[in-house]
Image (cartoon, rainbow, N blue to C red):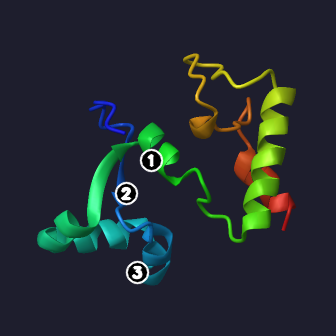
Amino acid sequence: MVCGNSDRDVLTFDHKDGRGEAERNQMGGQFPTINYYFMNPNEAKRKLQVLCANCNWRKNFDGAGITGVESISNTKLLRSQLIELLGGPTCADCGEVDERILTIDHVAGGGTADRALDT
């Protein structure tokens, strides 16, 4: 899973045990969590690793943020169908074809506002 990407703009902190979201919620967000690990480097070395965004997506693809086996399979199916509808599994920017790491992006921005309409 080590791709060799060293571009700091795309590197992420990954929780080896997969509990990053729960920990960020408990600590009050991303910045307090990063600050905590900065102040506790031995714990950071034990619990975290640095992955590029693509390797992080690949590692967590099988259920990241989704609860329940049925929800995972339904979400993957709908996501795959939407990718096909939008032209197939190829990144419009760089040509990447690994569907696990592709994201669906609003062409003119506004994704946050669109998601707010769903609530």
Q: Which residue is at a point 12% across and 71% down the rendered structure image?
A: 42
Left or right, 12 with reference to 77: left
The image shows residue 113, relative to residue 10, as above or below, that is below
State the SS at label 2.
strand
Label 3 sits on residue: 27
Label 3 Cα neighbours within 10 Å, binned few <14 / some 14-19 / many ≥20: some
Q: Quadrant of the N terminus?
A: top left
Compute the Cα span from label 2 to label 3.
Answer: 16 Å
Left or right, 62 with reference to 45: right
Residue 9, percent from left and from top: 36, 37
Residue type, numbered disc 2: Asp
Which of marks 3 and 1 precedes in the sequence? 3
State the SS at label 3.
helix
Q: Which residue is at a point 59% across and 19% down the rendered structure image?
A: 93
What label does residue 56 carry, if any? 1
Label 2 sits on residue: 14
The image shows residue 24, relative to residue 70, as above or below, that is below
Quarter residue 48 falls in: bottom left
Quarter residue 66 falls in: bottom right
Which of marks 2 and 1 precedes in the sequence? 2
Residue 82, percent from left and from top: 83, 37
Given contact means CB atoms under 8 Å apart, are the residues at marks 1 and 2 in contact? yes
